Image: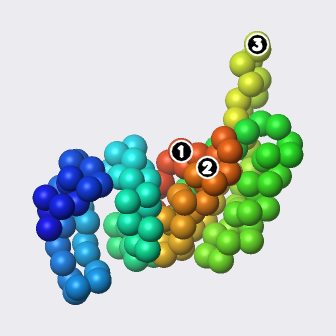
């Protein structure tokens, strides 16, 4: 099973344990690699859902959106209407010189909606999951 996940998804997956024919525990490195592997899981397994991350059923996710108001508002609206997703905070770092920063959204996400969130981001131009924090509170 491990070899399948390492080949089909990402070779940095450390361990896979089958709990039942449809439930797997997948162990990954934390931080940035976790996010990369989650994105690959969302793409490779369209029906997959995450039940928990680090024993948490609710996590924080930072998503970046384009700085322009129209696309930022569209992304915020899409996320606000997703069950199990709540936009908690919107922010943007100050502009320095000519560098314009993307807009950021801090989302409270039920784990079962995390891969759906990744899939939704791929449909929205310029919207990316930047960080998945394996905690909320």
| Residue indicated by mark 2 | 63
Q: Closer to the N terminus: mark 2 or mark 3? A: 2
Residue beneath the point at 54% across and 67% down: 116
Q: Are marks 1 and 3 in contact (CB under 8 Å)?
A: no
Is residue 110 shown left or right of residue 107?
left
Residue beneath the point at 79% across and 62% down: 77
Image quarter hosting the N terminus = bottom left
Total numbered labels placed on residues in the image: 3
Of badges 1 and 3, the one in the foreground is 1
Crowdedness of circle 1 by 10 Å Cα count: few (<14), some, many (20+)? some
* Image location (x, y in percent) of residue 83: 65, 77
Residue beneath the point at 63% across and 54% down: 123
* Image location (x, y in percent) of residue 9: 29, 54
Q: Can residue 50 be seen in this view?
A: no
Farthest residue to the right: give it: 70
* Camera-nearest residue between 55 and 137: 55
Q: Which colour scheme is used?
A: rainbow
Q: Can residue 125 be seen in this view?
A: yes
Element assignment for label 3: loop
Crowdedness of circle 3 by 10 Å Cα count: few (<14), some, many (20+)? few
Q: In the rendered structure, find residue 97 and report the number of the disc placed on it.
A: 3
Give how far apart the Cα atoms at labels 1 and 3 are: 23 Å
Q: In the rendered structure, find residue 130 and report the number of the disc placed on it.
A: 1
Is residue 9 shown left or right of residue 137?
left
Of badges 2 and 3, the one in the foreground is 2
In the image, residue 96 sits, relative to residue 40, either above or below, namely above
* Image location (x, y in percent) of residue 6: 20, 54
In the image, residue 63 sits, relative to residue 1, either above or below, namely above
Element assignment for label 1: strand
Q: Closer to the N terminus: mark 1 or mark 2? A: 2
Q: Do the residues labelled 1 and 2 touch (CB within 8 Å)?
A: yes
Give how far apart the Cα atoms at labels 2 and 3 are: 24 Å
């Amino acid at each position: 099973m491990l070899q399948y996940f390492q080949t089909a998804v990402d070779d940095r997956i450390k361990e896979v344990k089958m709990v039942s024919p449809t439930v797997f525990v997948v162990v990954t490195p934390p931080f940035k690699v976790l996010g990369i592997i989650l994105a690959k899981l969302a793409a490779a397994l369209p029906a997959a859902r995450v039940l928990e991350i680090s024993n948490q059923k609710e996590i924080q996710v930072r998503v970046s959106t384009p700085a322009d108001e129209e696309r930022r508002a569209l992304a915020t609206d899409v996320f606000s209407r997703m069950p199990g997703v709540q936009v908690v905070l919107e922010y943007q770092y100050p502009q320095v010189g000519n560098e314009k920063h993307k807009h950021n959204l801090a989302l409270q996400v039920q784990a079962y909606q995390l891969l759906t969130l990744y899939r939704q981001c791929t449909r929205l131009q310029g919207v990316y999951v930047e960080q998945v924090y394996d905690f909320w509170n």
